[in-house]
Image: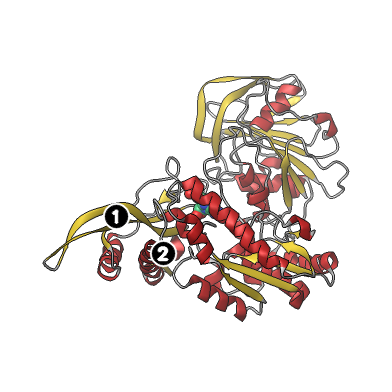
Amino acid sequence: KIIILDFGSQTTQLIGRRIRELNVYCEIVPYNKFPQGDDSVKGVILSGSPFSVYDESAFKVDLSQLRGKYPIMGICYGAQFIAYTNGGKVEPAGTREYGRAHLSTFDKSNVLFKDVRENTQVWMSHGDTITAIPDNFRVIASTDKVKIAAYQAEGEKMWGVQFHPEVFHSEDGTQMLKNFVVDVCGCSQSWSAASFVDTTVAELKAQVGDDRVILGLSGGVDSSVAAVLLHRAIGKNLTCIFVDHGLLRKNEFKNVMHDYECLGLNVIGVDASEKFFKDLEGVTDPEQKRKIIGRDFVEVFNAEAHKITDAKWLAQGTIYPDRIESLNITGKTIKSHHNVGGLPKEMNLQLCEPLKWLFKDEVRRVGRQLGIPDHLINRHPFPGPGLAVRILGDITREKVRILQDADDIFIQGLRDWKVKDADGKETALYDQVWQAGVILLPVQSVGVMGDERTYERAVALRAVTSTDAMTADWAHLPYEFLAKVSNDIINKVKGVNRVTYDISSKPPSTIEWE
Ligand code: XMP
């Protein structure tokens, strides 16, 4: 495997994803947590960082522990760090170098550039630049503006690149990463969904044996895939719990319970909506709402888990991006996200997280491999606190009913509206957007229906495109589609007389309104 040392760059996860896409296994670890003594490590990548090498608080590693033992590749800050600590010079670039550039000259015979096209486009994003490299290093690529765009240490398997091969706009970036991980490090490209399922089922059998396992289902992709994987390994010894907080989409609880039954899972459905509505009564502050829901959820889940007295394990659908120890540099909380939280301590359950090394697209691949139907696998993400973060202001059953009806029309509409993609293939709008939903606004406005004046609520439609929810753009849905949805909602949903479309991107907005 490849180890990626994370120095806090926004694109560290992308390095991991690119390498996994090459079917090579890799792990991202904080810069100071290199797994010493792990024989399966075949190479190391140093990520970028928001710091400058000469910042006092800059993250540093002891390169002598790695050098000569493993092939090394430094990206951006990683490259600057290697150069700087070996006697090179790193200085602030006159202007920040950001955006596309081309490798106007590069050493075609260097293994890093095997099968890389002439003048290939690369993506730059750096404030500092390497102005001199150590004596025994050699420049192997330049752009018009950046003389030292890539280097290699003479006679050593150590490279540095100033640009970001992991981002989409570096055209041959994946090829360069492949040259490093496959040709230099000798990793095999054998990481696949089928092999993952086989090895994980075997590992789970060995790990939990004949013990009983409890798992919290949410209706989402991750927990569903985790459940089916465990079910394949231990069958009846898996008990799932699905809590309905009353803030799910219309008919969601019933439909998802049905899906789970078809998959052969043993699921206990708990209708706890009474408790949630009571505890949320009159609460308008977004963070307060999130906290109450998080707390209630743990309470209800734990009470149910307690009834399963012979349980030894708690399984969760935690995936890799949930876990990567993010080097939180600003320390600010934007929203307190909630997932199934808090182990009931006195139950002494051990934690089992079979998807903890997977990225989202890999979870989907594994799900398909396990035969989970497409409509479950391709579902949009849905926030843990549910419709509560889409009702601005306090929450009542009536407001949830209005929102559920409007949301159902929008989502069904997206599923039914087919468009032709570039290859002439028909796809539903639903599959072209990352996520969609309706928001109930705390606003009433005047309208006219028949001869009657109305004074009713406004809703906002939200649909975004994204690859990881970190950034998102509003989806450019066809006007004809928006017109139809608006019409349907106003005609069919009692209590709504105005529909708006949210055209904000993230950042500076977020996907959810609360
Ligand atoms: P924001 O609103 O922060 O949302 O742009 C980013 C993504 O996270 C989802 N989201 C949540 N998911 N628990 C979750 O599991 C939560 O508390 C939560 N809040 C937001 C949101 O739907 C979007 O996909």
Q: Position of residue 453 (x, y in %)?
A: 15, 61
The residue type indicated by label 1 comes to Thr
Mark 1 within 8 Å of ligand 1, using the beta carbon: no
Mark 1, Cα crowd under 10 Å, few <14 / some 14-19 / many 20+, is some
Q: Residue at the spot x=82%, y=33% of the render?
A: 67
* Element type where label 1 sits in the image: strand
Q: Position of residue 459 (x, y in %)?
A: 32, 57
Label 1 belongs to which residue?
A: 500
In-front residue for pair 431/329: 329
In-front residue for pair 442/483: 442
Label 2 belongs to which residue?
A: 397
The residue type indicated by label 2 comes to Arg
* Element type where label 2 sits in the image: helix
Q: Residue at the spot x=63%, y=45% of the render?
A: 13
Q: Residue at the spot x=65%, y=37% of the render?
A: 327
Q: Position of residue 178 (x, y in %)?
A: 68, 49
Left or right, residue 126 beside residue 151: left
